[in-house]
Amino acid sequence: SFIVGSQHNERRRRGKGKMAKSKAGDDGSAAKKRKRKEPSDPDVGGAKSKKVAGASAKKRGGATAEQRWRPMPVRLDFGSAFCRHVFLRAPSKGTEGAEEGTALFVAAVPPGWSKSTLREFMSRFGDVADASLVTLDSAPDVAGGLVRFADARGTKRALAAAVRGGAPLDPPDSTARSVGLESWVADFRDAAPPPEVLQSRIDQWWVEFEAETARKEAAARGAGEDDGWTVVEAKRGRRKTTDGEGTSVGGIRAATADARRTEGPKIRENFYRFQQREKRRNELFELKQAFAADKDRVAKLKASRKFKPV
C-alpha cells in the first residue's frame, strides 16, 4: 500500500508540471501574436488602418461622408414652430460639377416650390449657377433636383447647415403667405382681374355682340328678300319717318293733327313752380276750413240729441 500511494503522488506531481508548462507556452505564444499585430510606429498603423477601412468601404460600395444624405430643417412658414427637412448630398462621379465640388443633390423639396424657388432658397449659401427640379408623375408631391454653385464654398456652406436638430431655416421670401384680414384682402385682389384685362374683356364682348347683331339683321333681310316680303319690326317710342331728302320727321296721326288745328294750343295752368306751391297751400287751407265746419256741425247735432227733462 505504501508503494501504491507513492506512485499515485508521483503521477500527480508530473501532471501539475505538465499543466504549468502548457500554460506558460500559451501565454508566450499570445504575447508573440500581440507583438506581431502591434506596429512599432503608431502613425503608420493609423494610416494603414484608414487605408484598410477605405478599401473595405469601396469594396462594399459605401458612400463617403459628403455623399450621404444630410437633413436640413426648413420652417413651414415664417415664424412657424413646425418644420420639415430637405435632404442634401454630394453627387457621385460623372455628374456635372461633381469633380469641382460645386453640385448638390436636393431631395424632398416641399410641394409648391418651383425651380426659381429652389434657386432662391439655395442662394443664401452662395451664388447659384444653375438649378433644376424634377417631379415624379406617380407622386406629384415628391420632387428633387440638382443645384450647381458658382464655386465649392457654396456647397460646403450648404452641407454645414444640413444638420439634424440644428436651427431651422426660413423658407424663401417668395413663399410668404399673408394671414387673417391680409389674406382675405389678398384673395379678393387676386380674384379680381386687373383693369387692363377687364377692359379687354369688355371690348371683346362688344365686338362679339355687334357681330352677332349684324349677323341676325343680315339673316332677317335675306329671308325677306327671298320670300318677296318686307320684314317690319315693331319698335318702341315715337315713330320716325324720313322725307325725300332723308331728313327724319316725326310721325303723327291725322286725328291728332286736326284736333290741334281746331282747338288751338292748350293753356297749361300752374305751370311754374311758385304757382304749384300756392295751389297746394290753398288746397290745404280749404281742407282745414272744411274740417272746422264739420266739427261745429257734429257738435250741434250732439247738443240737439241730448235728453232734456221738463
Image (cartoon, rainbow, N blue to C red):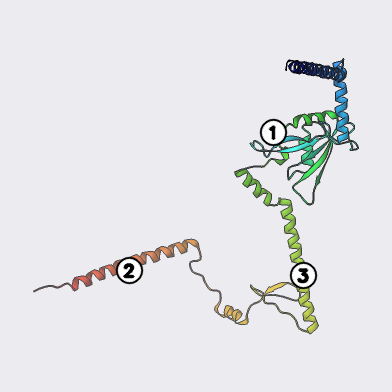
- Rendered location of residue 296, percent (x, y): 26, 68
**Residue 101 is at least partly visible in this image:** no
Quadrant for residue 21, please give it: top right
**Residue 223 is at least partly visible in this image:** yes
For label 3, the residue is: 214
**Which element is circle 3 on?**
helix
Going by the numbered disc 1, the residue's amino acid type is Pro
**Which element is circle 2 on?**
helix
What's the residue at 83%, 32% (across, down)?
Answer: 64
Mark 3, residues whose alpha carbon is within 10 Å: few (<14), some, or many (≥20)? few
For label 1, the residue is: 168
Label 2, label 3: how far apart the Cα atoms are: 66 Å
Residue extending farthest to the bottom is 228
Residue extending farthest to the front is 1
Q: Determine which of the numbered discs, if any, sits on residue 290 in the image.
A: 2
- Rendered location of residue 109, percent (x, y): 76, 42
Q: Nearer the viewer, residue 294 or 94?
A: 94
* Quarter containing the C terminus: bottom left
Mark 2, residues whose alpha carbon is within 10 Å: few (<14), some, or many (≥20)? few
